[in-house]
Structure formats: structure tokens, C-alpha cells
Image (cartoon, rainbow, N blue to C red):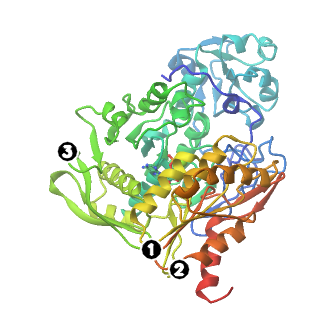
């Protein structure tokens, strides 16, 4: 059961912005939305903004308040009798007329996305109650409604038009209800989940890469995108809402996916979004001061993360390099460490790096198994992510040789992502967009840099203004050259955002490097590449995998990786 926490409106409001794409047509629902399917390898712009769903990205809907695409649903659904759900959920049924044959074929918590036959989950929110949207849900064909006592009293549900399942904690039980409706799909595939403050996205891609190297049919669920057996969809959240997640697992099962690699955010755990999900492997990276706007304190944040280790994961794999990790260890835990001298089950030794930003290390597993591994990403923390991924893969039966292949061939969008076209300096795109992340990314690069560090950084508009000087200062203290540029200014005057960053950068005085201000992000990236000398490191930070830059309400296509590639290519070809 999930912890009882205040639920911020952006997670409960029905009208939040939405970026899913429909891909499957359901035979008994002939009017589904247009299908858009892409193959991995021919990638369309897919982006969810770091500062919340749909604030930026190449495909933001015209009217962002309304979803333009529905989440995926499985094609084949065995109708589940309402009486079964009432009994299993231990809910109270309010029905004017008893229809023992009444059954549901789907579930959603968004009234606008109700399909005929659905159970509509009317959850309490901070500003409104889902039950206020029941009339819309019922007119779209909802068969029944799941809600709490308060919801059942709302005008839209009092008239008894459809049966109402009343439960004291509808959000907590929704995950299990959704799993029952879609046939408990997480029992049909192996779900490998990873939680922690940093490294979830990176580790989930490392795991997926290893699974692919072992020939498994894979799924991936996370911040950047969702992948189903080689097809990709945009993600609205790091971890989808429970009904969408269970439907997604069911689609994966239909598509032959045997193993799904998944980021599990602390929000998702606290809000019960992964309730009803069986994890073959649950993993923990680390914990640091982050998301404390949502969780009251570190203890509560840790309590949310630790829900992945409450028995729902068959095998538990934990990085024990923090006290938080150590607190999760039980006699059954598979421990991981990259600190020297620990007796963890999985460790790394003999770290090495190349001037162009690759890492290599010796991987040590149980039973004296060792292998030399390379990682096409810089950053010692990525070795920790890689050893964690190796332990997770081993737990699901992947051979060490396949693990090594998976690590060597991984591509993680916008996370310490190396751009290498044969140039004699390292060039990296990273998603670091908070002071601590900028510090960590630059410390990791500095630790292995032979030459200078040249950083390009901006801050987003309409968000936390306090972090701007801090980011400027963190960056300038760790760079020989800092180029302050624009991120997503949104409705703000970009010059003022840069000015705040510059004031922080200047406060470092002689402890910092040279500072340049170049508003145009493309020009800033070009300048960084122009300045690079052999052995230097160029870091383009802040936007990571994002594919759009939002300026004054308009999202312009923009990719740090593409721009960095173009600039390096120009330089290699001798263009200005
Ligand atoms: N194990 C780690 N420890 C510290 N920082 C990390 C780690 N892994 C990645 N990072 C940094 O944190 C940022 C977020 O990484 P990511 O893999 O997207 O994590 P998450 O999905 O948990 O937010 C990246 O920009 C990277 O520089
Ligand atoms: Mg992530």
C-alpha cells in the first residue's frame, strides 16, 4: 500500500497536458485515434520537457491542455465481471439494479479518454474530484465508476446511472484493479525496475541494451520515451499512471516482449502508480536531496523509494555506496559497489578513460566471474550505473559476455551522451539542469579530462529562479570557459535569465573560468566547438534529449546533439 502523501494537482488534475501516442487499434473500438508507430533507429522528435509534461518538445499538441492522443490499449481484452473486481478490491458496490453479467474491458482515470466498457476511476484531487467529471465519462460509455465515499456523494454519481465501486483508497487500489482488468500482465513478462534520485534513465537503457544483446524482446518505460519491441512512443511521465502502465504491459505482452526495463520514480511509488506490478528485479541507485518539493523530507523521500523493496520485487539489487542504500540491504539483497574495499557482490576495479570520453573497467561478479567492460559514456558514476545494470541483468539470466556487449553498445539519449565524429576532443550532451547535477556532471568530466573544460549552459524560464545564479556559479567554478546561453526561456525575457546566471558566475571571481554570453544556443555550441583544443572536454548541459526550444510560447525544433554534431562536422571539414 502506498504511503499517504499530499497529492500535487499536476498529478490529479484531469486537464493536465498529455503526450501519449495511440498505436493499437482495438477491434471492438472502431473509432480509435490515428495510429503513429515508429521504429527505433528512425527516430522522430520525441520529447518531454524536464520541467513538467509537455512544456517543450517537438510535438507539443496545439492545445496543450487537451490530450490529442490516448495511451495505448491492448487489442484483446477478456471482460472482467464487476462482481469480481468488487470482491478482489474489497470495495462497496452501489447499484440501483444488480446486473451480475456486467463486466469491464478497460480502465482510465481521465474522463476524456473513456472508451465504451471502461471502468472510470474518479480519484480525489487537490483542486477537484474526478467524480465531477463522471457525467462526461458515463456519456462516453463508462460501465462503472471507482471512487471514494466523497466521490460517491457528488451530483454526477448520486443519480445511480452506473454502478459505483466505493473504496477508502481508490488511488491505492487502482493499480491492482487495472492489473486485474488487463490480465495481470506483469506476471507474463519480467519487469526490471530501477529507482533512486539519479541514474534511473541511464541504468534502464543499460539494462535494455544488455537484454537486447542477449536476444530478448524488450520493452522500456521511462523519462525519455517508451519502447515496445523496437517501436517507440513518447512518454508523458517518467512512470505512467497505473491504468496506462498496466495497459502498456498488456500491449508489451501482445507484442511478444519478454523483458521490460523501467524507471520507477518516487512519485510513482508514493502515488501507487506501480501497485499491482510484479517486479522480477527491483534496483536502487542512490538518494540525494531532490524532489523535496513533493516529499516533506529525506526520510519520507526514502520511504517512497523503499516501497520498491517491500516485497514486490522478486530479486532486490542495491548500490550500497550510500547510507540509504545500506538501509535497504537484507540477507537476500544483491549488493553493488564501486567504492574500493567493499565486500559487495558486484564491483568494479581498474577504471580507465579515453580522451574522447569512453570509460573502461573490470567488472567483478559472484563466483569469481570477471570481465573487462567498456562504456561509451564518460563519468565515473556511469560505471556505478553499469555495474548495477550488470547485476540486474545477471539476476534475469543474461550471460556476462552479453552484459559486456550490452554495456559497450548502449545509446542513452542526452545522459552524458558522447558525440564522437573522430575529433580530438571529447564532446558530451548532458541533461544536468539543476545546480547539484551540473556540479556532478562537471566533477565527473574534470576527474578524467586531460585538457580544459568548456561548458555551454542556460536555465529555463517560468521555473525556479533561485537556481540560476547557483547553476552559473557551479558551472564556472568547474570550467575553464563557461558560455552562458538560452535554454527554454518560455514567457520570460531570456536576457534576464542569463543576467541571473552571469551574476552567479561572476561571484566566483578568480575561482572561476572565463565567461562568455551568447544568447543563441546554436551559436554558443558552435563557439564551444571552435574553442576546443586536443584533449579538451566540451559539455552542452541542460536540455539533454529534448528536441525543442520553447521561446515565447512557440516550440522551435532544437537538439543539442544534432547541433553539436553539426558544429563538429563543420570543424572537421574545415568550414568556419
Ligand atoms: N549514478 C549517478 N550518480 C550521480 N549522478 C548521476 C548518476 N547517473 C546519472 N547521473 C547524472 O544525473 C543526471 C540524470 O541522469 P538520469 O540517468 O537521467 O537519471 P534519472 O532518470 O534518475 O533522473 C544526468 O544528467 C547525469 O549527469
Ligand atoms: Mg529519468
The residue that disc 1 covers is: 356
- How far apart marks 2 and 3 lie (CA) works out to 40 Å
The residue that disc 2 covers is: 421
Dot 1 and dot 3 residues touching (CB under 8 Å)? no
| Horizontal side of residue 216 vs 2, given as left or right | left
Q: Which mark is residue 271?
A: none
Disc with the residue nearer the chain's start (1 vs 3) = 3
- Vertical comparison of 377 with 308: above or below: below
The residue that disc 3 covers is: 343
| Horizontal side of residue 515 vs 379, given as left or right | right
Residue 57 x, y percent position in the rendering = 72, 55
Q: Quadrant of residue 237?
A: top right
- How far apart marks 1 and 2 lie (CA) works out to 10 Å
Disc 1 vs disc 2: which is toward the camera? 1
Image quadrant containing the C terminus: bottom right
Q: Toward the viewer: 415 or 532?
A: 532
Element on which disc 1 rests? loop
Q: Toward the viewer: 511 or 330?
A: 511
| Residue depicted at x 67% and y 10% | 149
Residue 63 x, y percent position in the rendering = 84, 46
Element on which disc 3 rests? loop
Q: Quadrant of residue 182?
A: top right
| Residue depicted at x 38% and y 72% | 354
Q: Toward the viewer: 357 or 466?
A: 466
| Residue depicted at x 44% and y 43% | 193
Amino acid at each position: 500500500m502506498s504511503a499517504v502523501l499530499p497529492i500535487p494537482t499536476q498529478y490529479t488534475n484531469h486537464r493536465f497536458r498529455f503526450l501519449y501516442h495511440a498505436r493499437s487499434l482495438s477491434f471492438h473500438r472502431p473509432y480509435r485515434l490515428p495510429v503513429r508507430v515508429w521504429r527505433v533507429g528512425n527516430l522522430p522528435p520525441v520529447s518531454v520537457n524536464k520541467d513538467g509534461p509537455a512544456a517543450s518538445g517537438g510535438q507539443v499538441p496545439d492545445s496543450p491542455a487537451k490530450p490529442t492522443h490516448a495511451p495505448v490499449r491492448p487489442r484483446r481484452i477478456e471482460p472482467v465481471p464487476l462482481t469480481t473486481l468488487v470482491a478482489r478490491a474489497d470495495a462497496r458496490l452501489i447499484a440501483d439494479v444488480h446486473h451480475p453479467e456486467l463486466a469491464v474491458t478497460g480502465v482510465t482515470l481521465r474522463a476524456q479518454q473513456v472508451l465504451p466498457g471502461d471502468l472510470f476511476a474518479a480519484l480525489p484531487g487537490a483542486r477537484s474530484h474526478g467524480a465531477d467529471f463522471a457525467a462526461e465519462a458515463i456519456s462516453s460509455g463508462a460501465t462503472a465508476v471507482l471512487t471514494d465515499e466523497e466521490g460517491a456523494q457528488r451530483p454526477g454519481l448520486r443519480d445511480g446511472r452506473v454502478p459505483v465501486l466505493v473504496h477508502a483508497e481508490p488511488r491505492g487500489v487502482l493499480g491492482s484493479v487495472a492489473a486485474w482488468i488487463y490480465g495481470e500482465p506483469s506476471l507474463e513478462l519480467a519487469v526490471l525496475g530501477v529507482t533512486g534520485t539519479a541514474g534511473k534513465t541511464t541504468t534502464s537503457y543499460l539494462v535494455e541494451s544488455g537484454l537486447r544483446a542477449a536476444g530478448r524482446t524488450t520493452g522500456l518505460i521511462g523519462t525519455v520515451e517508451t519502447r515496445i519491441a523496437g517501436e517507440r512512443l513518447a512518454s508523458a511521465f517518467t512512470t505512467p499512471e497505473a491504468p496506462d502502465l498496466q495497459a502498456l504491459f498488456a500491449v508489451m505482452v501482445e507484442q511478444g516482449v519478454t523483458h521490460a526495463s523501467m524507471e520507477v520514480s518516487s512519485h510513482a511509488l508514493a502515488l501507487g502508480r506501480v501497485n499491482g506490478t510484479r517486479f522480477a528485479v527491483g534496483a536502487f541507485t542512490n538518494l540525494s536531496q531532490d524532489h523535496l518539493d513533493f516529499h516533506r523530507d529525506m526520510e519520507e523521500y526514502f520511504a517512497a523509494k523503499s516501497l520498491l523493496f517491500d516485497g514486490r520485487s522478486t530479486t532486490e539489487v542495491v548500490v550500497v555506496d550510500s547510507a540509504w542504500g545500506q538501509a535497504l540491504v537484507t540477507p537476500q539483497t544483491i549488493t553493488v559497489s564501486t567504492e574500493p574495499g567493499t565486500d559487495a557482490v558486484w564491483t568494479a576495479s581498474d577504471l580507465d578513460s579515453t580522451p574522447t570520453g569512453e570509460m573502461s573497467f573490470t567488472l567483478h561478479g559472484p563466483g569469481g566471474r570477471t570481465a573487462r567492460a567498456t562504456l561509451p559514456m564518460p563519468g565515473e558514476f556511469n560505471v556505478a550505473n553499469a555495474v548495477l545494470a550488470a547485476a540486474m541483468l545477471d539476476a534475469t539470466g543474461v550471460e556476462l559476455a552479453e552484459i559486456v556487449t550490452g554495456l559497450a553498445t548502449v545509446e542513452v539519449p542526452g545522459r552524458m551522451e558522447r558525440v564522437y565524429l573522430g575529433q580530438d576532443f571529447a564532446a558530451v550532451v548532458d541533461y544536468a539542469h539543476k545546480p547539484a547535477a551540473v556540479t556532478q556532471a562537471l566533477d565527473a568530466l574534470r576527474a578524467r579530462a586531460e585538457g580544459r573544460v568548456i561548458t555551454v549552459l542556460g536555465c529555463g524560464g517560468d521555473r525556479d529562479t533561485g537556481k540560476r545564479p547557483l547553476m552559473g556559479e557551479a558551472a564556472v567554478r568547474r570550467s575553464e570557459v563557461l558560455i552562458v546561453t538560452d535554454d527554454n526561456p518560455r514567457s520570460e525575457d531570456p536576457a534576464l535569465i542569463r543576467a541571473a546566471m552571469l551574476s552567479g558566475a561572476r561571484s566566483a571571481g578568480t575561482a572561476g573560468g572565463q565567461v562568455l554570453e551568447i544568447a543563441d544556443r546554436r551559436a554558443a555550441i558552435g563557439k564551444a566547438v571552435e574553442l576546443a583544443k586536443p584533449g579538451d572536454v566540451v559539455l552542452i548541459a541542460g536540455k539533454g534529449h529534448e528536441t525543442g526550444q520553447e521561446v515565447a510560447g512557440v516550440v522551435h525544433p532544437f537538439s543539442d546533439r544534432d547541433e553539436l554534431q553539426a558544429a563538429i562536422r563543420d570543424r572537421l571539414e574545415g568550414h568556419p
